[in-house]
Amino acid sequence: MPLRPGPFPELAGYLESKRGLVTRRWLRAVRSDPAIEQAARLSTSQLLDHLPSIFEQICAVLRAAPDETSPVHLRDNAKKHGRDRWMHGYQLDELYRELDQLQRCVQQVAREFFAGTSASRKTQTAAHRLIEDLFSATIHTAIKQLLEDQDERIKETSGERDRALSAQKQSEERLRMAASAAGLGIFEWHIPTRTGVWENSRMYEITGQPESQGPLSCREFVRELVHADDAQALITDYMVAMEYGGDFHETFRIVRIDDRAMRVVEMYGRFQSAPDGSIHAFIGTLEDITRRTLAEESLREADRRKDAFLATLAHELRNPLAPIRNAAQILGQIVGDMPPEVEWVRATVARQCAHLARLIDDLMDVSRISGGNIRLQREVFDIRQAIQGAVEINLPTAKERRDHIKVSVPDVPLLVNGDRTRLMQALSNLLDNAIKYSDDCAQIAIDATSRDGHVEIVVRDNGVGISPSQLGELFSPYVQLPTPDGRWRPGLGIGLSVVRTLIDMHGGHVTAASDGAGKGSRFTVTLPTVQVSAASTPDAVGLSRRPARRLRVLVVDDNRDAAESLAIILDDHEVRCAFDGESALAMAKEFRADAVILDIALPGINGHEVARQLRALPDTAHAMLVALSGFGAPEDRARSREAGCQQHFTKPVDPGILVDLLNSYAAGHAR
């Protein structure tokens, strides 16, 4: 039976920490199960036997990557357990129920673990399914070993054929009982005669075939039962498995014979060969997984709705942030004529606006990460640029708290193949964390060194530190650990989770270390470097804040505060405002704009359609179109590009970025 991939290291660690609880629950369940008669005759130590080893191996598989841990040891321990139970007189169904009780206890503790986390439904479903698969493999291996030992003893103690056949029949019957208890239908298709044998009543229950009419052959099964859209794929895979051998596994839909209800089923099986090498039979199991499939789809739909809600929430929060940030920028332009109290108000508004925008970005990143929707825009660049950018982002907060950030990087480029923006974001999050968890006047350092084909970036602080017991939880999403000083620290507890994911996506890793409470922290990021000419990664060119010429700029936004405040900031150019798509198109024809800064979520004609029509007008066909939106996912940026926008910024954008962009355009596009 194939196992689903890991790793789930946090779950494995939690299970190991709850090993005593699992053991107690399991012992209580086994002792109270009247169907496990032999359990009453065994001591506690005899009952436990190989179960600790099985439990440890299951945790090891949960912790490790798929290509790192083989379930060989798990199968060995299951064989030992099956042999031990046979020696104690266990019957097959007793062995099955005993291991099934262990699975129930482990799944219960796993559910308790996920109840205390923010793991996505997809992750929870995958973890529970992996545990289910691991126990299924364990149960089958233990049962097989018990049957082998039972059959071997029969052969050794009796030379009478009829006794051996009778014992084998009993074993097969118990196996059918165990399969039925697990909800599996057992069947056989005889290849030469094209007939079918259904070993238990569960086959009739799953398919809706009346027992009075007997089993279906392979051909009848496909023709009368399998959904028409799935039949060809099932036939093709069945024929491939027959030709090349190996296990057969297929999930498909059927239409039940009695009530015509559609169900989703899962089939496992294997072909058996006759002594002459010809294919003799196909023996398989059938399971109705409709309920599980619907539950998984419901979880996926809930995730989709959650993502849509978060995107809408982010958009609605970003819209009012844009005019607030613009207003702070305008105050900064006239601060020389204002009293110190006004400068304090301006700086506070700008700082808190940037903080709120950062929280929104982190929240959206966690949602995209959990849904696997982050896509890296890779390029070869000098990581020193990302370090400098991260420092500049955090410098205002550091200055306010009188912190000192010391930067130490080599004089030569450190080239990496990665997403410049995402790596800057990760390093910025680490610096923000260092500032947040340090007192005022802190000493913070960020160092970069190159060694053995990697660049190592270390962020150090002399802040509150981290206790050893907390280090393992730092990078979990939505986790805010208590600090030794007892002070509350702002944030959602997701910044470090974003850091780990982004660094992992770049083929690197991040670690945390601390000498203890009050002794500061160290975060180390390691990334692979590339050998490329430094000439291929030019440094950013600083732009003048004075335009080479005045542009005709049209600002389009249904939020009047946002549009009018941005127009004030861009007063070095000739700026006009429009507040809906229709008036923007009419004004563009008369105004002949050189550049259009365009909100996307406009009433009536949306920004994408406005952009397409502007591209069709002779006077604006070659204008610079800049999308400005509360939505900033990769698919939102792609739609803006398709509509004809050269740039897409997420609100609230730094006004200085727009100033530099317009000035650069003015310098390169003379009338």
Image (tube, rainbow, N blue to C red):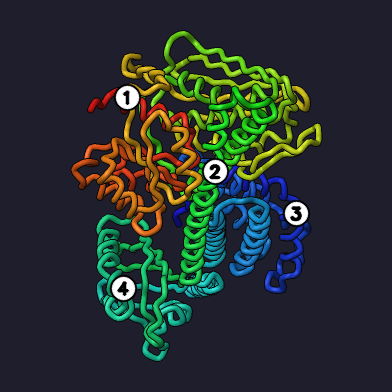
Gap in Å between the C-alphas at discs 4 and 2?
71 Å
Q: Position of residue 406 (x, y in %)?
A: 61, 15
Q: Quadrant of the C terminus?
A: top left
Of tags 2 and 3, which is closer to the observer? Answer: 2
Tell me if mark 2 has few (under 14), some (14-19) or many (20+) residues whose alpha carbon lies within 10 angstroms of its own: many
Using residue 90 as the reference point, say whether residue 290 is left or right of it: left
Sequence-wise, the earlier of marks 4 and 2 is 4
Name the mark on residue 21: 3
Sequence-wise, the earlier of marks 4 and 1 is 4
Q: Is residue 423 visible?
A: yes
Instruction: Describe the element under mark 1 as helix, strand or loop.
Output: loop
Gap in Å between the C-alphas at discs 4 and 3?
48 Å
Q: How many marks?
A: 4
Name the mark on residue 321: 2
Gap in Å between the C-alphas at discs 1 and 2?
30 Å
Q: Position of residue 666 (x, y in %)?
A: 31, 26
Q: Residue at x 25, y 68 (%)?
A: 232
